[in-house]
Image: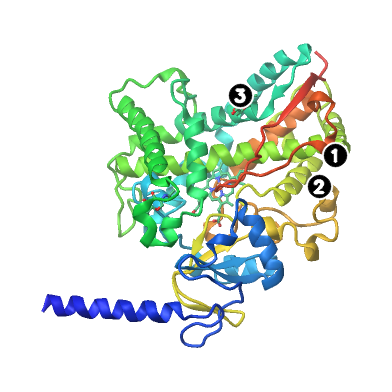
């Protein structure tokens, strides 16, 4: 009996794959119309067209096939969304259908079987974790609790940059920004700076790469055992590295040997988490989730991965654009001078008054959305959108990089860095205006926006207010290299360098 059943399944499987192979790109097996898209090769589908910078390749393709485009990544049907109107359909009108995440191997390893937040499928576990993280870490009031931390760290940053200034040395901006963001986020999340023995940064950069890369094995399971890209090895190493760090921190806490030098008026996320170890996250709900060690590890991986690199990258791109556009840099410095004056540094309380800064940040995130393809979404049921059939379990890729460059929305100078375009415009980046969604939108939109934006604005304002900047080796502004490097976040390919000159009085 079992063998007959097995035989039946084998036959069924063969039949299914048969139908599958003869599927034309634009018609589903029931003759329902899929969105248009490029022709597909057997087995790999369209994987070969992605290239080194998939968001740019998909941007070019969308020009030909339209804002709702159908491609196939190996066996996985994928919908690429490349206009504001289309994004609104997927992230607002039908948000609930597209609010899940695909199961990918990298997330499985890194977050202990998707027990975190960012890569977890839509459902009650995800909802519980998200609420919990907002409550204990990401809400506006929590973010405010850490104002002092940000202040202390930016003061240290300015002091450190000032040391290089009188000798007219070139400064590794990427490094300085990376360090200050790491310090701020570590103190917010863990309540302490990471000592030098804890090498976070390389692990996080690797995580972002591995989480963003299009894994051949995820799309063509047949090839998985071969691990052609050598990703499995790297993934194991990275997730073991991160988990070891977190385990050590949890152990230290449990043995009561945590270094308490930094116990302050606020309680950081890590200490809240471990103090709630083995208790339910949602005591009042029917279905309860107990936070165990694995959940903590997974949530921490997500928080660390989502906060360090995104914020650093966003700041780096903004400073790069300012260096490339001396006119904009001058306007921003003038605003800072008018609002704050040359006698003191920027305080967080000044930020709401800095309207030009706000436009600069928007413009930078328009051209350089840190996560250009957001995090992939997955549909949870069959659905028809503007006449196109989209099967259940399709992967949804929203190309914000492309949306930010749409000349229909941003006019002919869409490629140009021109903050004044936001002057009399109501377009905001919080996920209500789909022309500008660097933080995504809807149920899966970035819950760390407040923390990310505040940190980003403060660091940029401080560096631009306290220093004049000059490119090294008499490089002209338009010679600054702006090449991108792809991953879940897209940083500069080349590190950023410039010469600071202190400009405050005293
Ligand atoms: C400038 C900085 C940041 C940018 C540009 C950014 C952008 C994004 C984007 C585009 C997404 C995906 C949205 C989607 O798939 O629809 C996302 C998700 C997420 N972000 Fe951020 N982010 C930033 C900072 C942060 C910070 C500081 C945190 C705090 C820990 C954070 C935590 C998260 C989490 C947990 C998710 C997953 C949400 C979910 O799947 O439910 N982000 N972010
Ligand atoms: C790619 O997929 C394979 C098999 O599905 C998995 O073992 C490997 O860890 C994955 N790598 C990444 C980076 O996702
Ligand atoms: C600049 O900083 C980056 C990031 O920390 C580092 O990887 C790079 O090696 C540094 N470059 C130089 C020339 O010091």
Q: Secondary structure at mark 2?
A: loop
Residue at the location (46% across, 44% down)? 302
Tell me where residue 396 sits by quadrant. bottom right
Q: Specify the farthest residue to the left.
A: 1
Task: Kindly report which numbered mark, 3 or 2, lies closer to the viewer in this rendering.
Answer: 2
The answer to whether the residues at label 1 and label 2 have Cβ atoms under 8 Å apart is yes
Q: Secondary structure at mark 1?
A: helix
- For the view shown, which residue lies furthest in the bottom direction? 31
With respect to residue 186, does 102 lie above or below? below
Residue picked out by circle 3:
153
Q: Quadrant of residue 220?
A: bottom left
Q: Nearer the viewer, residue 414 or 59?
A: 59
Residue 114 appears in the picture as rendered: no
Name the front one of labels 3 and 1. Answer: 1
Rendered view: 382 above or below 301: below
Residue wearing tag 2:
417
**Residue 343 image position (x, y, % from top left):** 81, 19
* Any part of residue 491 in sight: yes
Which quadrant of the figure contains the C terminus? top right
Say few, some or many: other residues with alpha carbon within 10 Å of mark 1 (under 14 / 14 to 19 / 20 or more): many
SS at mark 3 in the image: helix
The residue at label 1 has a CB less than 8 Å from ligand 1: no
**Of 51 and 125, the residue lying toward us:** 51
Q: Which residue is mark 1?
A: 328
The Cα atoms of the two marked residues, 3 and 2, are separated by 29 Å
Q: Is residue 135 left or right of residue 311?
A: left
The mark nearer the N terminus, 3 or 2, is 3
| Residue 142 drawn at (x, y percent) | 53, 39
Residue 425 pos. (x, y %): 81, 56
User: Separation of disc 3 and disc 1 at Cα?
Assistant: 26 Å
């Amino acid at each position: 009996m079992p063998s007959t059943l097995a035989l039946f399944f084998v036959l069924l499987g063969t039949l299914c794959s048969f139908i599958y192979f003869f599927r034309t790109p634009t018609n589903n097996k029931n003759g329902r119309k899929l969105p248009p898209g490029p022709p597909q090769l057997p087995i790999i589908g369209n994987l070969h067209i992605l290239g080194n910078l998939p968001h740019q390749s998909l941007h070019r393709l969308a020009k030909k096939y339209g804002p709702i485009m159908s491609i196939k990544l190996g066996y996985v049907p994928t919908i690429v969304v490349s206009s504001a109107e289309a994004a609104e359909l997927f992230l607002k009108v039908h948000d609930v259908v597209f609010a899940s995440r695909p199961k990918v191997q990298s997330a499985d390893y890194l977050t202990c079987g998707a027990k975190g937040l960012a890569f977890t499928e839509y459902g009650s576990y995800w909802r519980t974790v998200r609420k919990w993280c907002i409550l204990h870490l990401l809400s506006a009031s929590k973010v405010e609790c850490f104002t002092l931390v940000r202040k202390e760290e930016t003061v240290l940053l300015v002091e450190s940059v000032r040391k290089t200034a009188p000798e007219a040395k070139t400064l590794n901006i990427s490094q300085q920004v990376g360090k200050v963001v790491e310090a701020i986020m570590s103190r917010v999340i863990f309540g302490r700076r990471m000592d030098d023995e804890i090498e976070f940064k390389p692990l996080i950069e690797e995580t972002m790469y591995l989480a963003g890369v299009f894994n051949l094995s995820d799309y063509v399971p047949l090839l998985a055992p071969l691990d052609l890209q050598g990703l499995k090895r790297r993934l194991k190493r990275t997730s073991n590295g991160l988990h070891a760090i977190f385990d050590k921190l949890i152990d230290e806490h449990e043995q009561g040997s945590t270094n308490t030098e930094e116990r302050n008026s606020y309680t950081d996320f890590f200490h809240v988490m471990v103090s709630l170890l083995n208790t339910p996250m949602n005591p009042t709900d029917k279905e309860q989730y107990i936070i165990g060690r694995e959940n903590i590890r997974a949530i921490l991986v997500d928080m660390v991965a989502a906060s360090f690199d995104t914020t650093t990258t966003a700041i780096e791109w903004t400073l790069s654009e300012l260096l490339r556009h001396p006119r904009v840099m001058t306007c921003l410095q003038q605003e800072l001078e008018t609002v704050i004056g040359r006698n003191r540094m920027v305080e967080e309380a000044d930020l709401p008054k800095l309207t030009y800064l706000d436009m600069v940040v928007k413009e930078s995130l328009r051209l350089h959305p840190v996560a250009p393809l957001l995090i992939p979404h997955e549909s949870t049921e069959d659905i028809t959108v503007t006449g196109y059939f989209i099967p259940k379990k399709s992967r949804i890729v929203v190309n914000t990089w492309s949306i930010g460059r749409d000349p229909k929305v941003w006019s002919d100078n869409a490629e140009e860095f021109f903050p004044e375009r936001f002057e009399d415009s109501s377009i905001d980046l919080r996920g209500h205006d789909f022309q500008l969604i660097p933080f995504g939108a809807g149920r899966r939109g970035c819950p760390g926006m407040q923390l990310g934006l505040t940190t980003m604005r403060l660091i940029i304002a401080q560096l631009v207010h306290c220093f004049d900047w000059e490119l090294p080796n008499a490089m002209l502004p338009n010679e600054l290299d702006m090449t991108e490097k792809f991953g879940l976040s897209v940083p500069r390919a080349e590190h950023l360098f410039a010469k600071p000159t202190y400009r405050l009085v005293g």
